[in-house]
Amino acid sequence: MNATALFGLCAAVLAGIGVYGLIASPHPLRKIVALNVLGNGIFLACAIIARRGAAAGMGGDPVPQALLITAIVVAFAATALGIALTLGLHEEGGAASLSDEGGGGAREPA
């Protein structure tokens, strides 16, 4: 197994774990972490595709590399926004849960 296949397998595993975490967990913070894991799997797959030309003896294409760096910055900003919204949900409802059983959500007006 060469390095490209190994990185491709790791990218698929990361994406699978991220999708499972998004589906299985009702907790918002766990969904944010699962979304980050899914994104990292996608970033790794895109990096493998971007490196494909360099493995053939040509120079690596800088456009996909620049897009990956931009995507990482956007993912970081989206994570920060998600955590801020989760903190607001926790302050408003007393619990950071999206399920009805967890006691989260808006309070009744007094």
Image: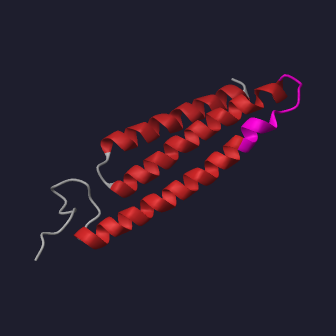
Q: Is residue 44 above or below residue 79?
A: above
Q: Is residue 71 above or below residue 101?
A: above
**Colour pattern of the rendering:** secondary structure
In magenta segment, residue 61: yes
Number of callouts? 0
The residue under the point 63% across, 38% down is 44
The residue under the point 72% across, 25% down is 2
Quadrant hosting residue 7: top right
Q: Is residue 51 left or right of residue 98?
A: right
Q: Is residue 62 left or right of residue 67?
A: right
The residue under the point 76% across, 32% down is 51
Looking at the figure, which quarter contains the C terminus? Answer: bottom left
Residue 56: x %, y % from top left = 84, 22
Residue 31: x %, y % from top left = 39, 50
Residue 50: x %, y % from top left = 73, 32
Q: Is residue 100 above or below residue 4?
A: below
Looking at the figure, which quarter contains the N terminus? Answer: top right
Residue nearest the observer in this picture, 7 or 63: 63
Residue nearest the observer in this picture, 61 or 22: 61
Quadrant hosting residue 87: bottom left
Residue 26: x %, y % from top left = 29, 49
Q: Is residue 50 above or below residue 106?
A: above
The residue segment tinted magenta is 56-66
Residue nearest the observer in this picture, 20 or 90: 90
Q: Is residue 50 left or right of residue 109?
A: right
Q: Which residue reaches farthest front?
A: 109
The residue under the point 62% across, 29% down is 8
